[in-house]
Image (tube, coloured by chain):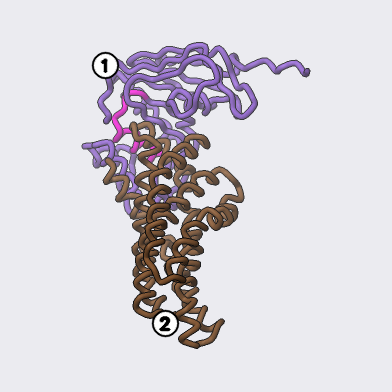
């Protein structure tokens, strides 16, 4: 399920996306190979989440092409963790599905070991975010699509996320990070999605 | 993979696992309990009309779990994450209709016994009701899942889905209750056939619906 094919890649060419009747952006092109990451910035509603979901293949592009090669790990504000279940059980569902081996290491790394018996709905925003990262690490996907990975995290957790991304890239992973917060990473490309905004159509 | 999904869906839906999933069964028995109070304890009236009451109660009980069937997992991003792991929406919905039926059909069949006692149904009638509920609940589960998937993105989805289920389940009700009126199991074959068709259709209809709201 999770074996990355030869080289992970994120690819978009002349991509245009819309949400409802509104064209969000167009002519967006991007290519990322192993070890590369791109930080896409933009105001709320500029189409960052739509971009991520289109690259993940969850939404169809309006024009152009978008695809990823290799297993995709998507991390957005919806963690996929059952709110009624204790965190450990909720994560174990995904760990089992993904064949994750290093459960304890992952939990320890994200400082979740003490929280495994707490139902997911009682977790704070930051704890839930860290749980999302635990799921992502367990998945072992080579392509990371991260939607606002830093929101709701405290300083030390932000630093941890930064480390995780650096590690992922040095393991020949590829990452697209969408965030309005700054993310200091060495060699990170930055694109503003607003540069691709569609001009408002003239009134008919 | 499929077994893991089934296990998770079952844990979510099964009565007495928390989250009020036992409500449909309690509701079902409650209707059967109230009916004798309303029409009086006359054995003849009760056993003549009781089988129909069981059918109505089963249909209304099928409305109760709809709200938690699909919308919650869309909000959770559960289906998105499965999609990224190569599970098709059709497979997700096929597993779900099975899990939904398992958590709703067999408990309702068991609850038919106390309901039949309360309604003073005689042996042959109970027999027809039991076969009918067994044949009809997969269809009710399938209609329920389709409606839940179609209305998942609507704000008033829960109220609307209740209204939608009633006309769609009418054929099941007509043939199911018709068997009681004629004391003849033949029309229960129609109930089973309708159920089978609905169950076969559901993964595709519900799968397309959750793809569309993504």
Q: Say which of marks 1 and 2 sits in front.
A: 2
Label 1 with label 2: CB-CB less than 8 Å: no
The relative height of residue B181 versus residue A169 in the rendered view (above or below) is below
Residue at label 1? A6
Q: Quadrant of the N terminus of chain B?
A: top left
**Subunit under mark 2:** B
Front-most of residues B129 and B61: B129
Chain letter, purple in picture: A
Element carrying mark 2: loop
Front-most of residues A53 and A144: A53
**Over which residues does the magenta segment extend?**
A129-143
Residue A126 percent coordinates (x, y): 45, 41
Magenta-span inclusion, residue A75: no
Residue B211 percent coordinates (x, y): 47, 35
Residue located at (41% from left, 76% from top): B115
Q: Residue furthest left?
A: A101
Front-most of residues B89 and A23: B89
Q: Is residue A93 left or right of residue A68?
A: left
The relative height of residue B119 versus residue B54 in the rendered view (above or below) is below
Q: Which mark is residue B120?
A: 2
Q: Which mark is residue A75?
A: none
Q: Are marks 1 and 2 on the same chain?
A: no
**Subunit under mark 1:** A
How far is disc 1 from disc 2 in space, using C-alphas? 69 Å
Q: Is residue B185 left or right of residue B40?
A: left
Chain letter, brown in picture: B
């Amino acid at each position: 399920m999770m074996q990355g094919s030869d080289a992970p890649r994120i690819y978009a060419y002349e991509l245009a996306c819309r949400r409802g009747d509104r064209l969000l952006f167009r002519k967006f092109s991007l290519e990322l190979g192993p070890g590369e990451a791109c930080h896409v910035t933009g105001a709320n509603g500029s189409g960052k989440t739509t971009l991520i979901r289109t690259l993940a293949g969850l939404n169809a592009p309006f024009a152009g092409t978008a695809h990823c090669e290799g297993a995709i790990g998507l991390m957005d504000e919806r963690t996929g963790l059952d709110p009624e279940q204790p965190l450990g059980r909720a994560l174990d569902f995904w760990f089992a599905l993904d064949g994750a081996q290093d459960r304890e290491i992952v939990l320890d790394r994200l400082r979740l070991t003490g929280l495994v018996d707490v139902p997911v709905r009682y977790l704070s925003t930051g704890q839930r975010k860290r749980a999302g990262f635990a799921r992502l690490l367990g998945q072992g996907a080579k392509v990371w699509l991260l939607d606002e990975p830093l929101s709701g995290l405290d300083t030390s957790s932000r630093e941890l996320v930064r480390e995780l991304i650096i590690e992922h890239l040095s393991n020949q992973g590829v990452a697209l990070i969408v965030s309005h917060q700054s993310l200091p990473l060495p060699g990170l490309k930055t694109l503003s999605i607003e540069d691709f905004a569609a001009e408002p159509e003239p009134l008919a | 993979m499929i077994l893991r999904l089934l296990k998770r869906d079952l844990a979510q839906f099964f009565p007495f696992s928390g989250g009020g999933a036992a409500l449909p069964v309690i509701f079902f028995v409650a209707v059967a309990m109230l009916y004798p109070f309303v029409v009086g304890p006359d054995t003849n009236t009760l056993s003549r009309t009781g089988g129909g009451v069981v059918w109505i109660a089963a249909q209304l009980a099928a409305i109760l779990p709809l709200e938690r069937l699909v919308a919650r997992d869309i909000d959770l991003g559960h289906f998105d994450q499965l999609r990224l792991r190569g599970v098709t929406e059709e497979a997700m919905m096929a597993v779900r209709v099975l899990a939904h039926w398992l958590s709703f059909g067999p408990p309702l069949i068991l609850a038919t016994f106390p309901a039949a006692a309360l309604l003073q149904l005689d042996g042959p009638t109970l027999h027809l009701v039991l076969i009918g509920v067994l044949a009809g609940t997969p269809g009710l589960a399938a209609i329920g899942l389709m409606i839940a998937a179609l209305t998942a993105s609507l704000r008033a989805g829960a109220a609307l889905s209740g209204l939608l289920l009633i006309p769609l389940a009418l054929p099941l009700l007509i043939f199911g209750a018709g068997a009681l009126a004629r004391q003849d199991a033949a029309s229960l074959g129609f109930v089973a056939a309708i159920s089978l068709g609905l169950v076969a259709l559901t993964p595709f209809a519900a799968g397309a619906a959750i793809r569309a709201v993504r």
